[in-house]
Image (spheres, helix red, strand yellow):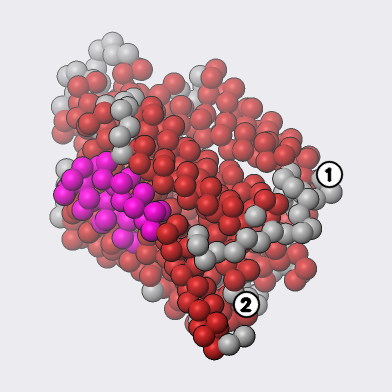
Amino acid sequence: MTPVAQQQGARNQQLILAAVCLSALVLPLSFTGGAVATPAIGRDLGGSPVALTWITNAFMLSFGSLLMAAGALADVYGRKRLFTFGMLLFTAASLAQSVAPSVFWLDVLRAVQGVAGAAALASGSAALAQEFEGHARTRAYSMLGTTFGIGLAFGPLVAGALIEAFNWRAIFDFTALIGVIAMVFGLPRMRETRDPDAKGLDWPGTITYSAMLALFTFGVIQAPESGWGNLLVVGLLSASALMLALFVMIEMRAKRPMLDLTLFRFPRFIGVQMLPIGTCFCYIVLVVMLPLRFIGVEGLSEIDAGLLLLALSAPMLVVPMLAASMTRFVSAGILSGGGFLIAALGLHWLSLYNVGEPKHALIVPMVLIGIGAGLPWGLMDGLSVSVVPKERAGMAAGIFNTVRVAGEGIALASVAAMLASLLQNDLSSAVTGNVDTVLIAETAHRVTTGDMVHAINTLPGLANERLVQGYASAFQYLLHILTVITLASAAAVLGLLSKDRTVAKAQQAAA
């Protein structure tokens, strides 16, 4: 190959990497942007509390449940073809969301956007593996991970700036613009690749897995409004448990399972799965819940809330890389468990501050949470493949990514439901007379979605100050629960991984 051809090939590789990174950037932007925009959407379009909750959860549910399936389809039908389909659909869904006439249609489009995001990310990641080799591949995937960190760190700030400068609809126009740029630079240079040994999609496993996540999320989101003992809620959660049992049976008997569950026989592999679960409950849920608190309840502007959230998310730009470097001297398990202990300290510290107190006091505990979550964040991808036999590394990575993405959706739905239930219990003791419990539940649910304007009008006779006081008490109790979950994650990680000094070569190279 001539020097000119080599130079052109290298340039094409960098443009393909840039396109895939841009496609990955819009995913955390869509995730955090939807959370920041929820109070503004509620003021503009109205909508029930359940419908407003689905603005975030519809995207996470469809994205998380179909990510593995999208990877299998990319192997069969071609990585470039599925990437093209995913980005076109993502861009179209983003543009449609910017003109959505109601919260219902916004929720539907968010689910479609999640499907498109799964297709784009799975196929784009697979395409990078074909374009790069050796250390270049490691650097490419490191850049992809850094892009996610940038999206999480600056997503709330970008969303806040767009809302203040224009309105909430501008967020979706912005993500559509990034999608167009990614396609313009990447598609002409991306080559079509397939897996010649691919056997197709595990349809029974995919259907039962997606149904399990969907039923569980529906049940948990509906519970605060209908009650945990409601027949519909019990039926949804029971059906979810049934789908989980069917999924396990199908995967245990399949010749080419979507997820090889026998890997859970390795204790260290179980310990690795605690890493994404722990970071979901100490970090990811706060990326969604804190904007709703700052904007909807405390009355901060979207841009001020975005600036404040930098204290939580900015450490993700630095700490993961530092963690990878530190594994030369300290066990990855000890670093990860220590990170959860730091995050638990930050969560407890954050719980000491009441709604309405000076916001600068929240910066240090939020930074601690970000640092604590950043330590396992930078190590868990490498650990996911280093704790199992080399020949099973691909399946181990697939299970890990499934647990991470599905865990985010489950954690978000569960934590939002817990907060609404805690606030409902508090309001029930504050309201006198014969007040319909449905109204109390609706009020609590509206407050947790940041819709204070409609919440005040839902329950007549309840002062705004009492509503805020109840929310503050419920949020404080929720932070205590998150602290306990984070401490339990630390104990599990330290118990299962602290003696393992093995770190994937990709981590070493990235460091």
Q: Secondary structure at mark 1?
A: helix
Residue drawn where x is 20% and y is 22% of the image: 457
Residue found at x 51% / y 30%: 218
Q: Where is 383 relative to 136, above or below?
A: above
| Left or right for 302, reference 495 | left
- Is residue 210 a member of the stretch shown in magenta? no
Counting from the top left corner in percent of width and height, residue 280 is at: 47, 53
| Residue extending furthest toward the top | 434
Near mark 2 (Cα within 10 A), the count class, few <14, some 14-19 or many ≥20, is few
Question: Looking at the image, which residue is at 67% across and 71% down?
Answer: 386
Instruction: Please state the horizontal and vertical placement of residue 437, each as a whole percent of the image.
Output: 35, 17
Q: Is residue 162 magenta?
A: yes
Tell me how far mark 1 sits from mark 2, CA to CA.
35 Å
Q: Which mark is residue 393?
A: none
The residue beneath circle 2 is: 133
Please identify, in this view, whether the residue under mark 1 or under mark 2 is nearer the observer: 2
Query: In the rendering, which numbered label is found on residue 253?
Result: 1
> Does label 1 or label 2 sit earlier along the sequence?
2
Q: Quadrant of the N terminus?
A: bottom right
The quadrant in which residue 157 appears is bottom left
Question: As rendered, which of 81 and 134 lies closer to the eye?
Answer: 81
Residue 510 appears left or right of 25: right
Magenta residues span 152-181
**Relative height, residue 15 to residue 70 (above, below):** below
